[in-house]
Image (cartoon, rainbow, N blue to C red):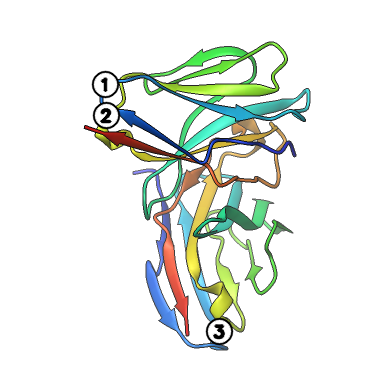
Amino acid sequence: LAKTTQPISMDSYEGQEVNITCSHNNIATNDYITWYQQFPSQGPRFIIQGYKTKVTNEVASLFIPADRKSSTLSLPRVSLSDTAVYYCLVGGRGFQKLVFGTGTRLLVSP
Amino acid sequence: EAQVTQNPRYLITVTGKKLTVTCSQNMNHEYMSWYRQDPGLGLRQIYYSMNVEVTDKGDVPEGYKVSRKEKRNFPLILESPSPNQTSLYFCASSLGVRAGFEQYFGPGTRLTVT
């Protein structure tokens, strides 16, 4: 499984766009990139998944460059309720063991 | 409502007293998994199950057992709990390989072993 590296923490203000980058230099050809969000004392929640280029849903966008060695989760116009830990995972569709890193702690201030 | 349930939500026990944390999902998911979460260490996978009667070790299986006799249930068993198993535990499920990484997590069980 590809190892991922994310910033430990990020700060932002309400209404700003937040971009969290994840490095995964050893990503395999059949690996997908998935992001989760976790609030304190709650289980993680799936946000978005992608393989290449750009994926967008009602919550976020995921940008993946051509070499796929990194990816960027983009949260448009964050609010206080977006304060959470964000995890980047990499693995194949035939996944078995999942590895969550320590994630990125995002703090959104008024 | 589609969900993953865990019981109990909170448990305080003593060293060596066997306990079971139950996990149940009502989504007919093939894949189920247990994680523990500790400060500064993120989520670590304990065991996972690809389907009924199929289980395998995650990254931190020592001191835990699991079973998957029915598709909907995946209990976590601590035969002889120790203080280093004090943690927040999450159960998760997924459709399986068809759904990739989209897992649904339960509300968590906070276990304290004294």
Residue topped by disc 3: B18
Q: What element carries label 3?
A: loop
Between B6 and A87, the one nearer to me in the picture: A87
Question: Disc 3 is attached to a residue of which chain?
Answer: B
Q: Is mark 2 on a helix, strand or loop?
A: loop
Q: In which quarter of the image is the N terminus of chain B?
A: top left
Residue topped by disc 2: A79
Q: Is mark 1 on a helix, strand or loop?
A: loop
Between B19 and B84, the one nearer to me in the picture: B84
Measured in 3D between alpha carbons, the distance from the residue under mark 3 to the one under mark 1, in whole angstroms, is 50 Å
Q: Earlier in the sequence, mark 2 or mark 1?
A: 1
Which amino acid type is shown beneath numbered disc 3? Lys
* A101 lies left or right of A17: right
Q: Residue A15 carries which label?
A: 1
Question: Residue at horizontal 37%, vertical 55%?
Answer: A41
**How far across and how far down the image is residue A50, in percent?**
59, 21
Question: Residue at horizontal 57%, vertical 31%?
Answer: A34
Instruction: Please tell me whether residue A65 is drawn above or below residue B27 in the rendered image.
Output: above
Q: Nearer the viewer, mark 3 or mark 1?
A: 1
Residue A24 visible in the current orientation = yes
